[in-house]
Amino acid sequence: AVGEAAQQVHAQQGVADEKRREADERLRLKGAYDADLETYQKNSRDMAEIAAKLPQMEDAIRTMEEDLDATRASGDAKEQALTKEVEAHQAALSNLNGLVVEVKEHVGQRRQGKLSEVTKLLAQLEDDHQQRAHRVGALEQRLQEYRSKIAQQDTTKRQLVANLEYRAKCEEVRAGEGKLSRVKQVIKERTKGHAGVWASLDKLREERGVLENERATFRGHLEAMETLLVERQRELRSPKYDRIDERYNSTLIRLATTQLAEEDLGKYASALDCALMKYHDEKITEINSIIRDFWMRTYRGQDIDHIEIRTDVEAGAGPARRSYNYRVVMVKNGVALDMRGRCSAGQKVLACLIVRLALSQAFCCDCGILALDEPTTNLDIENIDSLAYALTEIIQSRRGQSNFQLIIITHDEQFVRRIGNACGTETVFHISKGNDGQYSTINARDFAEMM
C-alpha cells in the first residue's frame, strides 16, 4: 500500500512538474514581452524629453565649442608667453647666482677695494632677485589658473563628447524603436484571436502556485511515508513480528468467525425480541379481555365501563435496554384515564383483585391454587356481592380441574356464606388465639353450623 501510494505521489509530482514547466515557459515569454514593452515606453519618454531639449542643447554646444576654441587659443598663447618669461627669469637668476659666486670668490681673495661696490651690487641683485621671484610666483599662480581653466575645458569637452555619444545612442534608440514596433506587430499577429491569453496566463500562474503547494505537500507525505516504511520494515524484522502472516491469518479467521457468530446472535436476539414482543402483545390482549369480563360482571357502578392494562415502552441503546411501564387505566365512553389518584379505595381493591385473577388465569394454567387475603377490604356491599358472584363463577368453571384450590382469608363471614352457599362448601377453617394468647389455633368447622 505504501509503494502504491509512493507511485501515485511520484506520478502526480511528474504531472505537476510538467504543468509547472509549461507555466514557466509562458511566464518567460510574457516577461520578455513586458520587459521589451517597458523598455520601449521608457525610451519613448526619454526621446520625447530629448527632442524637447535638443534645440537648446545644440545652441549651447555650439557656444561652448566656440568658447572652448577661443579659450584654448588664448591659453596656449599665454602659456607660451609665460613660459618664455619664466625661462628669461630663470636665465637671469642663473646669472645672478654666478655673480654671487664671483662675489664670494672676491671676498675670499680679500679684495677690499671692490667690496663696497660688490655689496651694493649684491643688494641690488638680491632686490632684483626677490622681485623676479615675486613675479615668478605670480606667473606660476596665473599658470595654475590657466591650467585649471584648461582642465575645466577638458571636462566640458568630455561632456560634449558624452553628449555626442548620447546623440548616437538616441539614433540607436530610434532604430530599436522601429525594431520593437516590428516585434510588437509580430506578437500582435501571433496572438491574434487569443484575447484571453493573459487571463489564461494568470490562471496558469495560480495553478502553478497550487501545484507547487501540492508538490510540496506530496513531497512531505512521501518523505513521511518513506520514513514510516523504513520503521515498519525494521519492526517486521524484529522478533515481535516473527511468523506474523501465519498469526495474522489465524487471528483473522477467529475474528471472521466471531463476527459471523455475533451476526447470528444478533439475528437470534432480534427474532427472540420480536417473538417476545408478539407474545407480550398477545398476553396483554388476553389479560385485558379477562379483566374486562371480570370487571363488567363484578363492578356495579356506572362511572367506569371497564379497566385495562396499558404498556409504555421506553427504548434504550439496544433491545436489552428496553423498559416497560405498566399502568391500569379506567375507560368510560372510550376515554381512558389513569386510576392512580382518581379512584376510591374500594375501586382500587377491586381492580387489584381482578388484575391478579386475570394474571393467574392467563399465566398459571397448570397452577390451580388461588389465594385471596382480605379481598373485601374497602368494598361496599354491592361490590362484595359482585366479587362473590365472580368468584363463584370461577369456581364453577374450574370445578373439573383436578388441582384447582381457592383459598380465601377474610374476617367477613357474610362474604364466606355467600360463596359457600353458591358453591356447596362443606367445611371452613377458623383461626383463633389460644387461651394463653401466645399461639393461634386452627379449627375445622362445619359450614352448616355457620349458617
Image: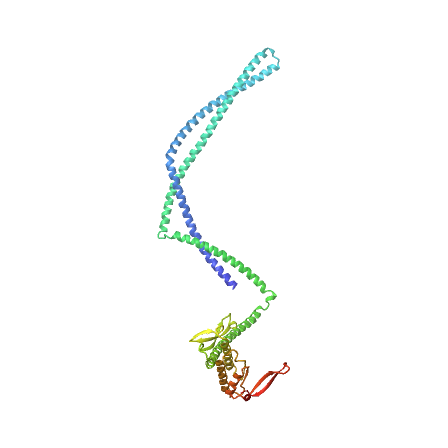
Answer with left or right where residue 204 lies relative to residue 449.
left
**94 or 363: nearer the eye?**
363
The vertical placement of 106 against 21, above or below, is above
**129 or 64: nearer the eye?**
64
Task: Report the residue at 52% width, 18% height from top.
Answer: 131
Name of the residue lying farthest toward the right: 436
Q: Position of residue 204 (x, y in %)?
A: 42, 54
**342 or 58: nearer the eye?**
342
**440 or 333: nearer the eye?**
440
Q: Position of residue 376 (x, y in %)?
A: 52, 80
Q: Position of residue 208 (x, y in %)?
A: 45, 54
Q: Identify the coloring.
A: rainbow
The vertical placement of 199 against 372, above or below, is above
Q: Position of residue 306 (x, y in %)?
A: 45, 78
Task: Report the residue at 48% width, 56% height from top.
Answer: 215
Name of the residue lying farthest toward the top: 113
Total tally of numbered discs in the picture: 0
Task: Report the residue at 59% width, 86% height from top.
Answer: 443
Answer with left or right where residue 418 lies relative to residue 196.
right
Answer with left or right where residue 348 lies relative to residue 185.
right
